[in-house]
Every structure is written in C-alpha cells, then in structure tokens.
C-alpha cells in the first residue's frame, strides 16, 4: 500500500504555511507505517495521472495570474481525476481557481477550471483573521486573508458552517466547498495541522480507493487538539 501525494504549484501558491498541509498528510501516513511518495508539480511540469491526493495552496492575485495558463492546460486532466475520485484539497487562491472564475478588485478575470461549483469576485475590503467553522466530524480552524467573496452555486455543499470569521463571503456562514472527494477552503495555517479529523477524512477517502479493506487506525492527536484550542481562543 503506497499513496501518491501531488503538490500543485508549491512555488507560486504557498502562503501562511499551506505547504504544511502536505507535511501533515505525510506525518500521519508515516505514523501509521503507510508508505507514500510525493511529487511537486510546478508550472510546466507534467501532472502524474496516478495521484491519490492533490493539494494546492493560497497566493496573491499575482501568483494566481502566474499559474492560470498552466492550470488551464491541466484542466481536462484535473476534471477527469476529480470525476475518478482523486482526493484534492485546495486552499484560498487555488480554491478560487477550482471554481469558474475570480474577478479581482481591478475587474480582471482569472479563469478557473470548473471543478467546484463556486464563483468568486473581489469585495470592497479584505477579510482577515482566524476562522472557526464546524461540520459533522470536526471543528476546523484556520487563518483567512482574502479579497475574494465566494458563492456556492445552487445545491452545492460547503465544507463547514462558520462560527467565527467570514469564510466564503462573510454573509451566508458557509466555509469552503466539497464535491465528491474535492475539498476547497479559505483556511490557511496550515489548516490540517489543527484539524486531524479533516486530515484523516482525506486519507480515509484516498485509501478507500486504493485499499478498500484498510482501516485507518487512531493516532495520538493531543498536541493538534491543544493547538486548535489555542487558535480557537485567539481574538480575531
Ligand atoms: N488573491 C486571492 C484573494 O485575495 C487569494 C488570497 C489567498 O490565497 N490568501 O482573494
């Protein structure tokens, strides 16, 4: 049993520790004795078809412009992989680009690749600070800093409900989006370091495809839970 993690655009799209999401996944696999390999895919690199988990981070609008053309070239392949159930976690800037588009504050359009049913346009002020959101299996906490306001298209599902902070748009209490095995969120931090349940949800879904009989065993999450407590209680 071996999982293949692919990290998209580590150079251009990596702010507020988003690369740590990869490290958390690697650590949680290593702790359970599960083998893995990691491939970094930057602009111009081929995207391996046999990935099990793909992660992408946040970035300035300028970073999003830098990857846009390359991402559009990878659109068909990523759409196919998403349909096949490859697990994906996209944060902030990459989350926006997994929707249909992001209209920046200068009214420029950055085209997305239409994997998540979301659309994004810049609001008048940046949304900055810690976010706390809940879903059925986790309290998720992270740091948001975005101008983009994201709206879920009809019938689509958010990742979690906002308890504190803005989340997708500061209005409807939705945070992130999930479609099949594709997850998007505004939470940096890295988000998985303080949500072991979300990290394991991703691993469980990935392992289910490659080794359906495997049951993910529990590991000691006391430090992660302590870190979450501190983050939840930090003023915004
Ligand atoms: N540039 C985007 C925005 O401001 C994404 C920011 C981010 O990834 N933190 O909305």
Image (cartoon, grey):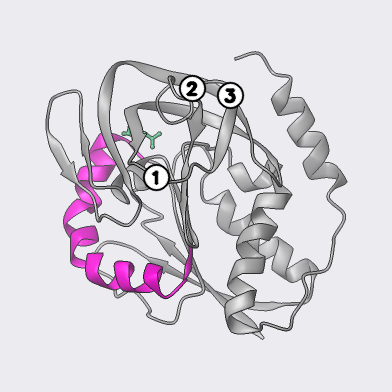
Find the magenta span and give its range: 59-87
Report the Cα–Cα distance between label 1 and label 3. Answer: 27 Å
Residue labelled 1 has its Cβ within 8 Å of some atom of ligand 1: no
Q: Which mark is residue 166?
A: 2
Horizontal side of 185 relative to 138 (left or right) equals left
Q: Quadrant of residue 82?
A: bottom left
Answer whether labels 1 and 3 touch (C-beta < 8 Å).
no
Q: Residue at x 78, y 74 (%)?
A: 215
Q: Residues within 10 Å of mark 3 (few under 14, many from 20)?
A: many
Mark 3 / mark 2, whichever is N-terminal: 3
- What residue is pinned by disc 1? 155
Q: Residue at x 26, y 54 (%)?
A: 114
Q: Is residue 104 above or below residue 170?
A: below
Horizontal side of 144 relative to 163 (left or right) equals left
Q: Which mark is residue 130?
A: 3
Horizontal side of 106 relative to 114 (left or right) equals left
**Is 61 contained in the magenta span?**
yes
């Amino acid at each position: 049993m071996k999982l293949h993690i692919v990290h998209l655009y580590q150079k251009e799209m990596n702010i507020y520790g988003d690369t740590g999401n990869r490290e958390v996944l690697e650590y949680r696999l290593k702790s359970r004795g599960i083998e893995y390999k990691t491939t970094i895919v930057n602009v111009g690199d081929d995207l391996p078809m046999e990935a099990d988990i793909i992660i992408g981070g946040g970035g300035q609008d300028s970073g999003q412009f830098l990857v846009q053309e390359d991402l559009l070239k990878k659109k068909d392949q990523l759409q196919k992989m998403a349909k096949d159930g490859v697990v994906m976690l996209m944060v902030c800037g990459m989350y926006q680009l997994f929707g249909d588009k992001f209209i920046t504050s200068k009214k420029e359009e950055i085209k997305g690749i239409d994997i998540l049913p979301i659309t994004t346009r810049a609001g008048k002020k940046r949304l900055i600070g810690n976010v706390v959101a809940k879903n059925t299996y986790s309290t998720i906490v992270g740091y948001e800093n975005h101008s983009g306001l994201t709206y879920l298209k009809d019938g689509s599902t958010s990742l979690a409900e906002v308890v504190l902070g803005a989340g997708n748009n500061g209005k409807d209490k939705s945070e992130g989006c999930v479609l099949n095995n594709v997850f998007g969120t505004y939470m940096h931090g890295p988000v998985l370091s303080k949500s072991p349940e979300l990290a394991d949800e991703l691993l469980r879904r990935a392992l289910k495809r490659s080794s359906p009989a495997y049951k993910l065993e529990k590991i000691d999450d006391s430090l992660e839970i302590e870190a979450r407590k501190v983050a939840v209680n930090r003023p915004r």
